[in-house]
């Protein structure tokens, strides 16, 4: 091979590497379509689905179908290896499931706040770029009228996802505010729907804190799911109203985006250097723009694995079944903040499915943590 040919070959390799890194970077921040699950049959009490890792998962789940139809699906009853199908309990249905050939399998147990059987209303919060709708859910008994819980959903989802944490705060008599934010399809739109990984979205949730304080709250508890956990952490440090933030409850939180991106690369079977280059691409002003971002990502700003940053007592709920955000990130976060973080490891579950697998353990951990704080401020 001549020197010229070798140079061209090397240039081609570098071009492919760069393309792979930018593609991964774009996949990290861009909204992704949810895979369709084939529905083979249904009765009044069961539904038979295409069997895969998700539909065989232990727990109770949601199945969206048709034009807004939703089913609450219980535990698996039978698995037929020959046909590749699984039959599961059918607990509740809204819509005509018998006419559906496919649906979207999710952790959304509650299709809307009405499913919680509590009084609720919707408000529109003024935020940068427009307005973000939020649900206000009133507890059955106002045991803690001056403490509100603000529930923050994760990436590539909407506020309906965060309804799962409302029963626990409702049990404590807290009013819940279930919020949206820019780029999630309900809050203000952003170019290409690209997530800024919490770097800017926290500003929208800050408006929810202001709303709560203006309507009777004296303090708030932030309940963040995945990316929502990253937003809650940013708020605890950057909000002008951070003194009112009493505690954090984080479910499978992203406490270190570098670790999460490396983990996503590994799960996709990509070499480690592709993940490293994707991180570099998102942090670079030029390549970040190619990934759809209006500004580069400051990964140091989003890294909570370093000691000394956290100032608020925090509960972390996570599991070692998480294939997206590794449990190791939560372990390092807890080790960096031993007096402030209580880590509860729940039974193995895919990302943010801890509640779906064991709602009783989930609720018990949240309720126990949010009881009146110990005088010494430690979380034990």
Image (cartoon, rainbow, N blue to C red):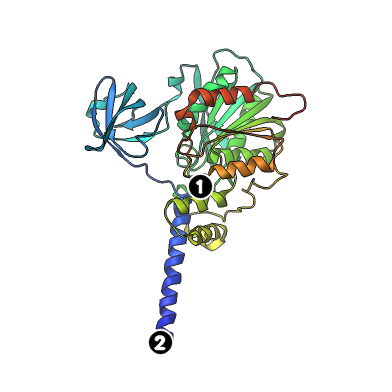
Mark 1: which secondary structure?
A: loop
Looking at the image, can residue 368 be seen?
Answer: yes
Category of crowding for the residue at label 1, using alpha-carbon neighbours closer than 10 angstroms: few (below 14), some (14–19), many (at least 20): many
Q: CA distance from mark 2 to mark 1?
A: 45 Å
Category of crowding for the residue at label 2, using alpha-carbon neighbours closer than 10 angstroms: few (below 14), some (14–19), many (at least 20): few
Q: Percent from the top left, x then y, of residue 284? A: 56, 61
Q: Which residue is mark 1?
A: 195
Which quadrant of the view contains residue 377? top right
Looking at the image, can residue 136 be seen?
Answer: no
Which quadrant of the view contains residue 214? top right
Q: Percent from the top left, x then y, of residue 378? A: 73, 30
**Is 40 situated above or below 191?**
above
Q: Is residue 207 left or right of residue 104?
A: right
Asked whether the residues under the numbered discs 2 and 1 touch, taking CB atoms below 8 Å apart as contact, a structural biologist would say: no
**Is 189 situated above or below 285?**
above
Which residue is nearer to you in this view: 130 or 227? 227
Q: Percent from the top left, x then y, of residue 56? A: 35, 34
Q: Percent from the top left, x then y, of residue 325? A: 51, 44
Sequence order check: which comes first, mark 2 or mark 1?
2
Which residue is nearer to you in this view: 6 or 207? 6
| Total marks in image | 2
Q: Which residue is mark 2?
A: 2
Mark 2: which secondary structure?
A: loop
């Amino acid at each position: 091979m001549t020197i010229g040919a070798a140079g061209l070959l090397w240039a081609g390799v570098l071009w492919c590497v760069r393309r792979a890194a930018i593609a991964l970077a774009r996949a990290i921040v861009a909204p992704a379509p949810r895979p369709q699950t084939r529905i083979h049959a249904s009765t009044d009490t069961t539904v038979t689905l295409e069997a895969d890792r998700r539909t065989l998962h232990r727990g109770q789940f949601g199945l969206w179908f048709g034009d807004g139809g939703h089913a609450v699906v219980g535990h698996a009853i039978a698995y037929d290896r020959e046909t590749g199908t699984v039959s599961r309990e059918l607990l509740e249905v809204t819509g005509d499931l018998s006419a559906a050939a496919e649906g979207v399998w999710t952790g959304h147990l509650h299709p809307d706040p009405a499913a919680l059987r509590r009084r609720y209303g919707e408000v529109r919060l003024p935020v940068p770029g427009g307005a973000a709708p939020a649900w206000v859910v009133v507890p059955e008994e106002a045991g803690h009228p001056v403490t509100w819980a603000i529930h923050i959903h994760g990436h590539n989802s909407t506020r309906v996802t965060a309804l799962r944490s409302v029963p626990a705060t409702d049990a404590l008599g807290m009013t819940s505010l279930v919020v949206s934010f820019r780029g999630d399809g309900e809050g203000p739109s952003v170019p290409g729907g690209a997530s800024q990984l919490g770097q800017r979205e926290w500003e929208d949730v800050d408006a929810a804190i202001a709303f709560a304080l203006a309507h009777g709250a004296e303090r708030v508890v932030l309940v963040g799911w995945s990316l929502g956990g990253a937003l809650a952490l940013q708020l605890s440090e950057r909000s002008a109203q951070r003194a009112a933030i009493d505690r954090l409850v984080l479910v499978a939180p992203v406490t270190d985006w570098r670790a999460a991106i490396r983990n996503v690369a590994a799960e996709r079977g990509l070499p480690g250097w592709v993940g490293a280059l994707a991180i570099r691409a998102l942090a670079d002003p030029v390549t970040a723009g190619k990934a759809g971002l209006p500004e580069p990502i400051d990964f140091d700003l989003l890294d909570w694995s370093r000691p000394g940053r956290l100032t608020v007592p925090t509960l972390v709920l996570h599991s070692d079944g998480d294939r997206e955000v590794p449990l190791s990130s939560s372990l390092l976060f807890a080790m960096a903040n031993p007096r402030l973080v209580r880590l509860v490891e729940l039974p193995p579950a895919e990302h943010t499915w801890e509640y779906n697998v064991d709602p009783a353990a989930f609720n018990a951990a949240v309720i126990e943590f949010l009881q009146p704080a110990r005088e010494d401020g430690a979380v034990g």
